Image: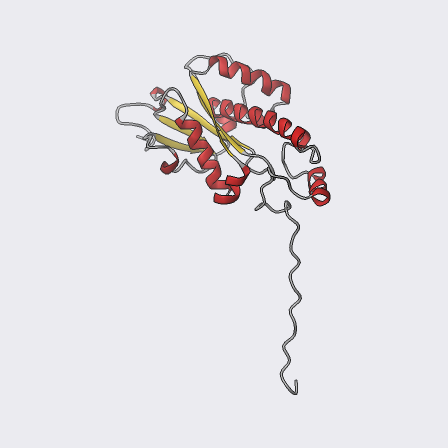
Amino acid sequence: MSENMLPGMETQSLITAGIDEAGRGCLAGPVVAGAVILPEEYDLPGLTDSKKLDEAARDRLAVEIKEQAVCWALGVCRAQVVDQINILQATFRAMGRSVTHLKVQPQMLMVDGNKTVPVQYLDGLSCRQEAVVKGDLKIPAISAASILAKTFRDKLMVQLAKRYPAYGFEIHKGYGTKVHLEALKEHGPCAVHRMTFKGVLPEKKKPRQERMCLPGI
């Protein structure tokens, strides 16, 4: 019996939530996590990893997922929190928030990637977990979570672009594109940039070491 299965129960019989994040590698904006519990039967044609879909397909599926899911929730960690606790811990915190805000308590978490959510971020929730590498391509509930996280975050970055129009957030959504990096060089970072990420702040030039000379050398 797998360690991810409860005695006398198969994994399929557990109330399972898929978990995924969006924006982990961005230079600006929050990291967002989605949690989705799908019913046994659903009709979501084209459901797959959000990165494999165009914007129109993601937006369509996001509406359908919300309509058909048993429940869904999102968790958000702002850029300032990313800088304070690092991106990995901020991702875990966002994932934990998405799980604890589900209206139905899951018995199993299927988490995209190679790490599960540390218990301190689950607010006392006790459930099984399994990390699934490329889970957004393999597990429908994870695919659904990735779509909800990405569509929410993309729309948020479009709104932030109106507040900070110099950076092109509406185009690249905070990722480190050439346009974004050039804007950073010209304008410097704004309040939603992750100051601890390489490329956001100018690199400090290392002071030239002065040679130490001893008498007669």
Residue 61, compared with residue 215, is above or below; it is above
Viewer-proximal residue, 181 or 189? 189
Viewer-proximal residue, 105 or 111? 105
- In this picture, residue 206 sits left or right of residue 118: right
- In this picture, residue 3 sits left or right of residue 70: left
Q: Which of the 4 image quadrants contains residue 61?
A: top right
Spot occupied by residue 92 in the image (x, y as percentages of width and height): 45, 36
- In this picture, residue 12 sits left or right of residue 186: left
Total count of labels: 0
Q: Quadrant of the C terminus?
A: bottom right
Q: Quadrant of the N terminus?
A: top left
Residue that sits furthest to the left in the current view: 7
Residue under the point 69% across and 42% down = 184
Viewer-proximal residue, 104 or 45? 104
Spot occupied by residue 193 in the image (x, y as percentages of width and height): 60, 40
Spot occupied by residue 212 in the image (x, y as percentages of width and height): 63, 77
Residue 106, compared with residue 24, is above or below; it is above
Residue under the point 44% across and 35% down = 93
Spot occupied by residue 77 in the image (x, y as percentages of width and height): 50, 34
Residue that sits furthest to the bottom in the current view: 216
Residue 141, compared with residue 169, is above or below; it is above
Viewer-proximal residue, 166 or 103? 166
